[in-house]
Amino acid sequence: MPLQWTFQPNTYGPEPPDLSGWADSLNISSFLARLLWRRGVCSLPEMDRYLSPGLRHLPALESWPALISGAEVLAECVSQGRRIGIWGDYDVDGITSTALLVDFFRRKGVPVSFELPDRFVDGYGLTVGGVERLADQGVRALLTVDCGIADLDAVQRARELGMRVVVTDHHLPGPDLPAADAVVDPALETDCPYAGVAGVGVAFLLMAALNRILPGEAVDVRHSLDLVALGTIADVVPLTGVNRILVKNGLLVLGEGKRPGVFALKEVSKLPPTAPMGSGQVGFGLAPRINAAGRLASPREALELLLAPDLSTARPLAAQLEKYNQTRRSTEQEILKQALEQAEEHRERLGLVLCGQDWHQGVIGIVASRVVEQMNRPALLLTGHGEGLKGSGRSIPDFDLHQGLCDCAELLQRFGGHKQAAGLSLAPENLEDLRTAFDRAVRAQIGEEPPPPRLQVEAKLGLDMVDLRLVQEIDLLQPFGLGNPQPVFCSTPLTVQKYKVFGAKHVSLQLRDEQAGVTMLGKAWRQADALSSSVAGRSMQLAFTPRMNYYNGLTSIDLQIRDWQCLAGQ
């Protein structure tokens, strides 16, 4: 489906007369200052903080009372000699959260047990059986990370077994809250100073608060920011506000590669182990390999990797995750082909509910994302699970998926998640009714026609403006992700002088800007089927992002092509 290019609107009013003066004081170009203004960074102090988001800019921990309450409960449990038990999740956010807290308690000399649910046995969230397993290990204080807000029965069972319970989560709550001693979830508060943080962000802040209370020498919490960056980027939460601060600093720690597990993971991802990291390298390189363990086998292997004490322990674990990831890719492609064929059969629906009885439970969430990308419609993918159906959903920006599932709640056994991603389960006899109800819920929110897929463009840019300083300044806007997208620019008319296909259907174009008198290379990844050799010699406009290209020891600037339009008459 063709993308509709929309220019970044100037919703923040006229640019201030002294914007160029602000740029000079920050040692940036007026062009970058203008981009920041259009992104809502509308004062000199805000621009300074955006470009240099130090940890000192985080809100005071005391400004979130629930966080302090959770830390105080845990400190009391430690003083009473209660064994702490951590229950995490099988995705990257849950695994990094668990690793972060296990590492912290070990450094403080506090005995700790931990469990990660098995996707295929336990399912998502805290379970009664899991609580009982922890109790058998002598746990008398339960701490959940990245889950628990909807697990009322399991929390109640923990209380029956004599446990103190602290629930930390970031998912949306249901009508009732768990009967825990403390519940730390930014989604519970409309004015939480840490709104939007991922589960690992909540875990990090709780550790920072607890670090002040527990006796003995304080732990340097900054060494855990690599895990915070990993989990936050992987969970696709907005990379704005406090998340920007946490991730920006976490990427610096990730780049150093001091954690053996991170070093080994970068090696198998074909990344320099001690080179700087961007959010894209995390999201497309490191995170999928961590996720692969929980999707295809046990998340415990990924947790052991992040907790590995040395490289000799870490490297075999990283190699195993790489094997899982390769298997995940092939399985994903097989299911995607079947899902798209089924989606064509339901093209009249604006909300897609697709089902394959034997689809791999650990991969359907990724496939749901691919279906949404190609069909531009919210999608639920379901597979067989015991005597029922279980699945994952992904959405388009215009549709609140969690609210949509609330509208279908009478047909579901269980569901939970966010506006853009969710999990669910149901009885097989409700499948057809869910297809009708979900389609109705989508139409109720977005109308009778799906909105066209959009690509937001920041500004028009001639190739004479594409130089080293521009690329370096764009990098100052990192980390890129939800809420802080990588800038995309619209080119002036360009002539395609040469066309070449390389690698796995990648396209290289030699492009000439006649007006500027500049020639550059552009690359479109995996686009050979859509961008054919017929464009050679034609005039085009590109939506692109300039970037540094490193190849065979040489450094150059090329254009990462996001979309293209052949000009009229060509």
Image: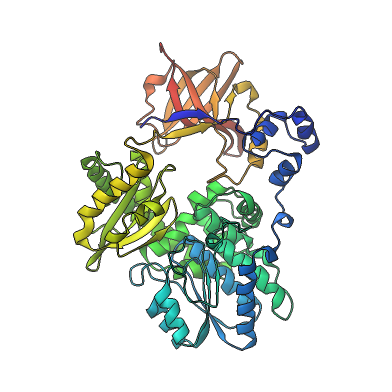
Q: Position of residue 87 (x, y in %)?
A: 48, 74
* Nearer the observer, 441 or 293: 441
Q: Quadrant of the C terminus?
A: top left
How many numbered discs sit on the rendered protein? 0
Name the side, left or right, on which 494 lies relative to 70. left
Which color scheme did the rendering employ for the protein? rainbow
Residue lying farthest to the top in this orientation: 569
Q: What residue do we see at 54% from left, 48% from top?
A: 281
Q: Position of residue 379 (x, y in %)?
A: 33, 48
* Nearer the observer, 355 or 534: 355
Q: What residue do we see at 52% from left, 21% from top?
A: 511
Residue 108 location, quadrant: bottom right
Q: What residue do we see at 47% from left, 28% from top?
A: 5
Is any part of residue 390 visible from this angle? no
* Nearer the observer, 205 or 89: 205
Residue lying farthest to the left in this orientation: 429
Is any part of residue 533 visible from this angle? yes
Q: Position of residue 264 (x, y in %)?
A: 54, 61
Question: Is the residue 511 above or below the residue 353 in the image?
Answer: above
Name the side, left or right, on which 335 lies relative to 92. left
Q: Quadrant of the N terminus?
A: top left
Q: Position of residue 104 (x, y in %)?
A: 62, 73
Name the side, left or right, on which 136 lies relative to 200. left
Q: What residue do we see at 50% from left, 84% from top?
A: 163
Question: Is the residue 461 above or below the residue 222 in the image?
Answer: above
